[in-house]
Amino acid sequence: MERIRYIGDIYRPPSEAYSLIIQATVGCSNNTCRFCRMYKAKQFYIRPVEDVLEDLRRARACCRHAERIFIADGDALIMPLQSWIKILDYIKLHFPECTRVTCYATPRSVLLKSADELAVLRGLGLEMVYIGLESGSDRVLKLMDKGNTAAEIIEASRKLHAAGIKISVTAINGLGGLDLLQEHAVETGKVFSQMKPHYIGLLTLMIEPPAPVCQMVDSGELKLLTPEEVLGETRLILQNCDCEGAVFRANHASNYLPLAGTLNRDKDGLIALIDSALAGKTNLRPEYFRAL
């Protein structure tokens, strides 16, 4: 049986664990983020759409049921509209059971698409995009060479809302280090509030080669947070976040304290759990259990 072809390591969001993954782009169109190691070994390019359709054909031959399909790699939204149309049309025709198509996106790839183009993608089945805020602080974004400003990601989120495309957004605890803890937390909460995402994922910074952040830590440019400081930062983010109805998750393997709820309904309860941990009444995940 012919196998689906993948180039290099493949990454997907935790919520796509049971999705069919089809690689339409290789690597990340930005790939400058100093905290990220995922695509450092790849040179970004867009695969020929014929190759993507062939992989979909191979997937159909061996996969009896694919309710969800994730289009990889990093920033697949950057593909030209015509390529997206061919892929989504193929999915609609050959995977009638598929109820959700998703992908990673950068603020730049969203802003490069017109409102009409995004509306076309939604109409053909692109239900949600995963987009990394990482921090609401422009100083932290610049420090980490993220490649966009907080204002740009807010603008991108508004375009996605207008097109009816759902938003799942992530931020990273500890990304500003100790020096920018307060600013990172407060501004991240405020930007979440303006983005109004459907899903919020909060990770915790991990130092893993070959991410350039490793050198920042070694040189002292970035001072890592203690687990207690991470919890305090999470508390500040929640206090400054007004995202009615957003699903909130900080239960990734990188997090010291698993948290899950729906905002704003569960905000006080989440903060109470943090306070319990800070008071030593709840155990934190040991360092050796943390992973990406």
Image (cartoon, helix red, strand yellow):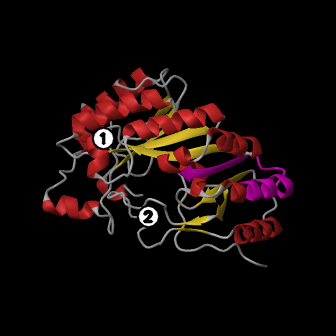
Placement of the N terminus among the 4 image quadrants: bottom right
* Residue 43 visible here: yes
Name which of mark 1 and mark 2 comes first in the sequence. 2
Q: Which residue is mark 2?
A: 38
Left/right of residue 279 with respect to residue 30 in the rendered view: left
Q: Amino acid at mark 1?
A: Asp
Looking at the image, which residue is at 80% across and 68% down?
57
- On whether residue 96 falls in the magenta region, the answer is yes
Q: Residue furthest left?
A: 220
Q: Which residue is mark 1?
A: 138
In this view, 10 is above or below 160:
below
Which residue occupies the foreground of this view, 24 or 217?
Answer: 24
Looking at the image, which residue is at 33% across and 57% down?
35
In this view, 132 is above or below 86:
above
- Judging from the image, what secondary structure is the residue with disc 2 in? loop
Occupied quadrant, residue 291: bottom left
Placement of the C terminus among the 4 image quadrants: bottom left
What is the x, y in percent for residue 14?
Answer: 54, 51
Give the spatial CA distance, label 1 vs label 2. 23 Å
- Judging from the image, what secondary structure is the residue with disc 1 in? helix
Looking at the image, which residue is at 43% across and 40% down?
152
- On whether residue 152 falls in the magenta region, the answer is no
